[in-house]
């Protein structure tokens, strides 16, 4: 019985059997049944695995080549941007210009608001 | 040619050396993703992302710390988990799809399809840690030590998970006959 347990443990773990264990498995109905069920499992697992689609390596290399203009291997850029083209509004100079324009606009609005209050006082005859 | 040599070649500017790495690892990577339950399209997407990430991060690969295969499958495992999460948020089912039956003809298509269906359902029912460890252990490219490195656990844990996963999957198939 111990021999059966040891052999079945090895079969279950997917480990290779020694010559003695193989002989035992062939002679023992219980161990043969266990071995057969695990063989069935291994064979069925093979059918579940995906196959490599045709031209997969070429597609990966095309994406890599697409990247070659900007990031070099290992420069640690973001994860997925190589899959799509680089967009003009993602360029740093453009973002800086927009940020400065927005800041300028905000300062102008505040100044204009203060100025309006000041001008209104003068128009009503008050002292500035 | 070993992987480290190819990595040095790529970092030295030989981009075509990367093709050799892709060709070496595309089959085990698709096998891993297929076993995890990814449908063909989703598997291709994750595999593509994995190789792109590998290409971009090659400079950070340290052969003293891990074998290239270990590093690659660590990335693949993380991206596969992200994809699963995204699919969950989209309430889609990229996993647990039946494989293309025509691609793998069986002696008795009806029996084989039913068997595969049972196995796919059993795979989906496995806890994630068990599933990842088991399928990484199925790859000839990784030893149990390397699977332990990818999973961040002890080798004993890997052995125990593999044993439990195999037993659960076998039981699901055996039920078929009873």
Image (spheres, rainbow, N blue to C red):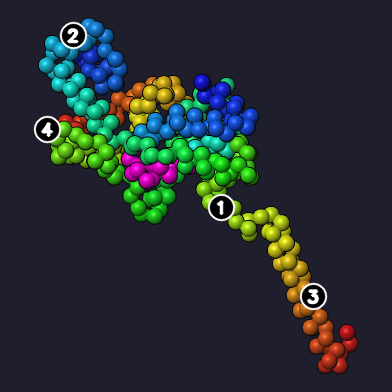
Residue A71 can be seen in this image: yes
Q: Is residue B65 above or below residue B32?
A: above
Sequence-wise first label, 3 or 2: 2
How far is the residue under mark 1 from the one under mark 4? Answer: 53 Å
Specify the quadrant of the image occupied by residue B14: top right
Q: What residue do we see at 35% from left, 52% from top?
A: B92
Disc 3 target residue: A111
State the predominant SS element of the stretch in magenta.
Answer: helix
How far is the residue under mark 4 from the one under mark 2? Answer: 26 Å
Q: Magenta residues, as a range? A: B34-50
Q: What residue do we see at 33% from left, 37% from top?
A: A50
Disc 4 target residue: B177
The residue mark sitting in front, 3 or 1, is 1
Is B97 included in the stretch rendered in magenta?
A: no
Is B35 included in the stretch rendered in magenta?
A: yes
How far is the residue under mark 3 from the one under mark 1? Answer: 41 Å
Q: Dot 2: what SS? A: helix
| Residue B165 percent location from the top left of the image | 29, 30
Q: Residues within 10 Å of mark 3 (few under 14, many from 20)?
A: few
Sequence-wise first label, 2 or 1: 2
Disc 1 target residue: A85
Have a look at marks 3 and 2 and say if they share a chain.
yes
């Amino acid at each position: 019985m111990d021999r059966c347990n040891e052999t079945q443990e090895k079969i279950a773990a997917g480990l290779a059997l020694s010559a003695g264990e193989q002989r035992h498995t062939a002679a023992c109905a219980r161990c043969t049944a266990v071995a057969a069920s695990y063989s069935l499992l291994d064979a069925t697992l093979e059918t579940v695995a995906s196959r490599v689609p045709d031209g997969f390596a070429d597609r990966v290399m095309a994406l890599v080549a697409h990247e070659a203009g900007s990031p070099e291997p290992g420069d640690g850029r973001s994860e997925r941007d190589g899959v799509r083209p680089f967009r003009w509004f993602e360029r740093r100079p453009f973002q800086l210009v927009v940020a400065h324009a927005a800041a300028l606009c905000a300062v102008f609005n505040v100044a204009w608001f203060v100025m309006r209050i000041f001008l209104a006082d003068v128009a009503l005859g008050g002292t500035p | 040619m070993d992987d480290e040599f190819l990595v040095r070649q790529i970092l030295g500017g030989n981009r075509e050396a990367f093709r050799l790495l892709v060709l070496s690892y595309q089959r085990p990577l698709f096998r891993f993703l297929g076993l995890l339950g990814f449908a063909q399209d989703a598997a291709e997407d994750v595999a593509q992302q994995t190789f792109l990430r590998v290409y971009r991060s090659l400079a950070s690969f340290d052969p003293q710390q891990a074998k290239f295969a270990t590093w690659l499958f660590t990335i693949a495992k993380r991206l596969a988990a992200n994809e699963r999460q995204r699919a969950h948020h989209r309430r889609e089912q990229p996993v647990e799809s039946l494989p293309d039956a025509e691609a793998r003809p069986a002696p008795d298509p009806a029996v084989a399809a039913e068997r595969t269906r049972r196995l796919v359902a059993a795979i989906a029912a496995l806890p994630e840690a068990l599933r990842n460890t088991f399928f990484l252990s199925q790859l000839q490219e990784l030893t149990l030590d390397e699977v332990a490195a990818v999973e961040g656990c002890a080798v004993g844990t890997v052995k125990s998970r593999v044993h439990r996963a195999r037993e659960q999957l076998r039981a699901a198939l055996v039920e078929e006959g009873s």
